[in-house]
Image (cartoon, rainbow, N blue to C red):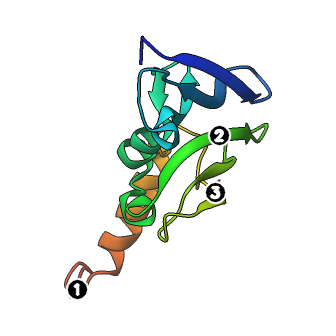
């Protein structure tokens, strides 16, 4: 990512996330000169598509896409809009809606509560009265 020029297009409300596109003039095919990126305080600058697959498990949804430019991010960091090459290799707009702000780890107390509820509902986990 170091040899590319970054164009920032959107920032969330507290400035901890920024999105835009990277331009690489050294790539001969003009279509391949652009990639969407996201910058975060936590992870630095990353290709948006790779970051979404890694941190939000969106590989199935993005498998046939190539995200070329991110245009904006919502104030809370849960929505990202932009353009890219869709499944038919046509330029299309995209809207990504995340279940939590970008890069945020799911709340561990929610996971513990869910695990406790599942364990309580499993057969054979109830105590028998004598």
Q: Tell me the mark number nearer the camera, choosing from 2 and 1.
A: 2
What label does residue 70 carry, if any? 2
Front-lying residue, 128 or 7: 7
Mark 3 and mark 2 residues within 8 Å of each other at the beta carbon: no
Which residue does the numbered mark 1 point to in the structure image?
128
What residue occupies the far front of the structure in this picture? 28
Q: Tell me the mark number nearer the camera, choosing from 3 and 1.
A: 3
Front-lying residue, 118 or 67: 67
Vertical arrangement, residue 80 with respect to residue 41, above or below: below
- Residue 10 is situated, as x and y percent measured from the top left of the image, at 75, 30
Neighbour tally class for label 3: few under 14, some 14-19, many 20 plus, Cα within 10 Å: some
Q: Quadrant of the C terminus?
A: bottom left
Q: CA distance from mark 3 to mark 1?
A: 46 Å
Which residue does the numbered mark 3 point to in the structure image?
97
- Residue 81 is situated, as x and y percent measured from the top left of the image, at 70, 49
Residue 97: name its quadrant: bottom right
Q: Residue at x 55, y 43 (%)?
A: 68
Front-lying residue, 28 or 84: 28
Viewed as shown, does residue 22 lie left or right of 93?
left
Total label count?
Answer: 3
Mark 3 and mark 1 residues within 8 Å of each other at the beta carbon: no
Residue 75: name its quadrant: top right
Neighbour tally class for label 1: few under 14, some 14-19, many 20 plus, Cα within 10 Å: few
Vertical arrangement, residue 42 with respect to residue 64, above or below: above
| Nearest to N terminus: mark 3 or mark 2 | 2
Viewed as shown, does residue 71 lie left or right of 103?
right
């Amino acid at each position: 990512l170091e040899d590319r020029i970054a164009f920032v297009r959107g920032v969330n409300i507290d400035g901890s996330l920024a999105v835009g596109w990277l331009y690489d003039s050294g790539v001969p095919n003009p279509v391949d000169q652009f990639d969407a990126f996201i910058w975060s305080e936590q992870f630095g600058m990353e290709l948006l598509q790779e970051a979404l697959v890694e941190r939000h498990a969106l590989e199935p949804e993005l498998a046939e896409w190539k995200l070329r430019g991110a245009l904006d991010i919502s104030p809370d960091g849960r929505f990202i809009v932009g353009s890219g090459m869709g499944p038919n290799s046509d330029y299309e707009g995209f809207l990504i809606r995340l279940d939590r702000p970008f890069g945020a780890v799911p709340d561990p107390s929610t996971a513990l509560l869910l695990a406790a509820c599942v364990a309580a509902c499993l057969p054979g986990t109830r105590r028998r009265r004598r």
